[in-house]
Amino acid sequence: MASTKLWHVISFYISTALAIFRNLLLYTLNLNQSPFLTKFMDTILSLYFRFCDLSPCAIDLDDQTTVHFWVANHRRFNKPSLVMVHGYGGNSLWQFLHQIGPLSRKFNAYVPDLLFFGKSHSKSLDRSDLFQAKCLADALKRLGVDRFSVYAISYGGFVAYRIAEMYPDAVEKVVIMSSGILYTDDQRAEQLRRIGRHPSEILVPKNPDDLRLLVNLSMYKQNSLHWLPDFLLREFVTMMYDHCRKEKIELAEHLVEKKADTNLPVLTQETLIIWGDQDKVFPLELAHQLQRHLGSKSRLEIIKDTGHAANMESPDEVNKLVISFVSGCS
């Protein structure tokens, strides 16, 4: 038994070293054609997800739409299933870097790329959060995941809310973090006036300065990009945002231009709302509005000295809240 475990460890490190070497060689040969450093980091993150006992898979819903997931290798029936839905700040790999380790140890984790992010794509012209929700729910059903809780960040919160609303028998608990689902038209207009730019210009940056602005709006404690050189930020923009740029912009425009839903259904599930008290993207008043809308089956947790990206700025506190709530220890 001990020798078998030792061989698994040795095999993992050998395969990791070979994968790193292979990607170094490929990217070096194509250095002038692709963002080398950020793609190399993408490879490292993929290996980390594998180390957390997850594997990538692609679900073809039809001849138009494919949803890419990272899924638990071995589903443990004594663990709850948790679907983790990212926002505009990245894809499944980059946005849950600080969370996949702790959460995958407690739950059967399913981490999708939303359509037009990462490796998920569609030929459909539908850009609604409702379409995103239907595609994720369909893909989860094909994976055999019939009951699950969902934890979603920012734009992902709009999608998760729709899933919970449409499939109440499938969704057990809901965690929504920093997601302005109950924006009124007047609040939206005022926030756009404060920012001074169209959200699509910020959410889908074109250059290093745009990316720094996005991070500055998302973070409170520090701007972690101020010391990074432009060439590295340009590589990140190329890798993360140039892919399906048109579609990402259309997703943002759909959210901004649609009228506020004054008859948004109240979820039947227990819901945990997590918010940074210094959120400059979705002000804290939106968290209170959502909590009042959902009523007694909801709970609001406010994290002090934290901005919009609480998963990056206060990951330990967020992880504890998610684990306690979804596991039923709260």
Image (cartoon, helix red, strand yellow):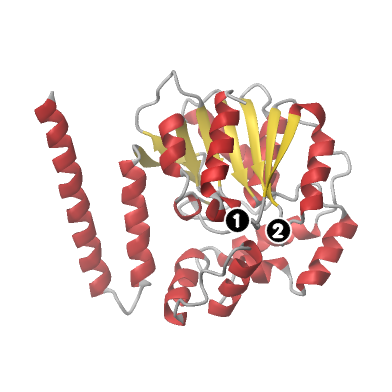
Q: Amino acid at mark 1?
A: Ala
Q: Give 99 or 85, whichever is nearer the viewer.
A: 99
Q: Nearer the viewer, mark 2 or mark 1?
A: 2
Residue 323 falls left or right of residue 296: left
Question: Split into 4 quadrants, where in the image is the C terminus?
Answer: top right
Query: Can you tell which quarter of the image residue 211 is in?
Result: bottom right
The residue shown at (12%, 35%) is 7
Q: Assess disc 2: are there few (<14), some (14-19) or many (≥20) residues with their C-alpha within 10 Å of its C-alpha.
A: many
Whether tag 2 and tag 1 are in contact, CB under 8 A, the answer is: no
Q: Could you tell me which residue is drawn at 65 percent across and 69 percent down? A: 202
* Residue at the farthest left position: 3
- Snapshot quadrant of residue 32: bottom left
Question: Which residue lies most toward the front here?
Answer: 304
| Secondary structure beneath label 1 | loop
Residue marked by disc 2: 278
**Residue under pointer 1:** 309
